[in-house]
Amino acid sequence: MRRSFRWPDERGARPPEPPRPPLRSAGWEEWGQRLLVTIGVLSSIAIYFAPSADGLSIEGRKAFSVFVLCTTLWISNALPYGVTALLAVAGLGLTGAMKPTDAYSSFGSSAIFFLMGIFLIGGALTDTGLSKRCALLMLRRFDHSPFSFAMGMMLTGAFATVWMPNQATTAMLFPIAMEVAAALHLKPKESEYGKLLFFSMAWGAMVGGNLSFLGSSRAALSLGMLQKSYGIGIGFAQWMVAAAPVVVLGLITTPLVLRAVIRPEPVDFGAARRVIERAVENLGPMRRPQYHALAIISLTIAAWVSVGGRRVDLAVIALLGAVALFVFKVLTWERAERHVYWNIVLMYGGAIALGSALDKTGAARWLLQGVLDGYQPSAMATIIGAAVLALLLSEVMSNAAALAVVLPLAFTLAAQSGASPVALVLAVSFGAGLDFVFPMSTAPNTIIFASGYLKTSDFLKAGLLMTAASILILIAVVMWWWPLIGLV
């Protein structure tokens, strides 16, 4: 029986949560997880009690032991990411790798408050129905044919993630895609058009999420780690100029990849067109909270572009925008609480603390010296290598965890190779957001997998090709576009 999805009402109902995928059954996967955790715990203990290696301080050895344990837990997903981050903070203080007060101070980073501001701004777009209104009006322009509608979902997702996180965008578009699939009588796991529709929606949001700070919460983490290590930031406009070719080329590549691996069956699109028309008719006129939200968010973005990152801290602007949403009664505290994802907030605080410990104790420098064994990469090789490593790691752990692992090491290598830390942060952030291969590697993939229209093999087949294309795009942009704009 098909599940019925309710449209969010204009009073601010949050988009319906997608159905959760079934719990994993006990088997090889569970045993593999247990084995990985066991290896990680034993390795962490062994590193902690081992004699310090040449060039590695006692504090560095302790920080490295905590790093190994947390990385293992992030990869295995044995604990929620936020819980692992709390363990990182506690472990750094308990082992003496870092003063507890220094570890706690990571939660006072501007990145954490910037992240909370982003969550509240995205929540205002969702709660007022403004994001749904914009999405439906945009989708109506693409309902000429099945393929154009799928591309409309991709472009709508990409456009929406300029202003709100990609997971929120995908959750907003999810019921639209489900209603269209039901109207077209698409068969779950069999319909090729269903695969095209859901992949277009999620991957558009993932690619478009690189264009601004708001598209993904990982931007806040990378900016926070940059601020912590170098005391510098990145402007909103600077980020967008650097990201534009990655996004444009990614959006051109997405339909090419999907058409190469998916052969959609013919469908009569008339029923789906009526679904969109009814939804647009039900929108009604704009309401006062929507006007207020539009004005406040527009002013916030204008402030980010004009003075953010240079004269005024980005987090300050985000918080002022969030406060204005409450002053003009766009948000209430009861509704706002649902939009601050504490698992992510906690993880980012722990990741910043862990990265700072690896840097200050010299553990990151020692590890790189051992791995590189005298090899001195160029600045360009450092940037590209770090970006590709983040992309590959994000396939097996969250993109935020990948940033937490890669950036401390990359910062150390940048000091040796002369690579620009700003370019390094941008490359790693973009790379970590292009994880297409596995259903559980990123929130948009998880959401569309829960639809029932996709199999794991579908992700592998299309995702491997898209990942390979993304690596080539990222390398090309770093090598040819960024030198033109003075980043490298």
Image (cartoon, helix red, strand yellow):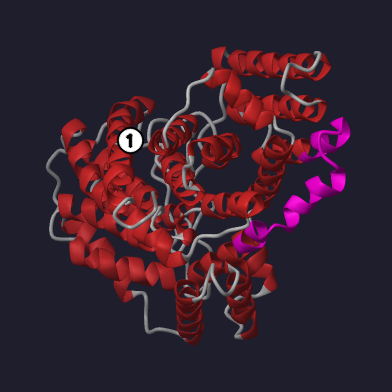
Residue 286 horizontal side relative to residue 194, left or right: right
State the image coordinates of residue 84 (x, y, percent, origin top left).
71, 36
Q: Can residue 430 be seen in this view?
A: yes
Magenta: main secondary structure:
helix
Asked whether 100 falls inside the magenta stretch, the response is yes
Q: Can residue 13 be seen in this view?
A: no
State the image coordinates of residue 185 (x, y, percent, origin top left).
25, 44
Q: Could you tell me which residue is drawn at 34 percent across and 37 percent down? A: 453
State the image coordinates of residue 361 (x, y, percent, origin top left).
74, 34
Q: Nearer the viewer, residue 259 or 92?
A: 92
Residue indicated by mark 1:
471
Q: Nearer the viewer, residue 222 or 151?
A: 222
Q: Give the range drawn in magenta.
A: 89-114
Quadrant location of residue 26?
Answer: top right
Relative to 422, is 315 above or below?
below
Relative to 341, is 310 above or below?
below
**Amino acid type at image mark 1:** Ile
Image quarter in which the N terminus is found? top left
Quadrant location of residue 149?
Answer: bottom left
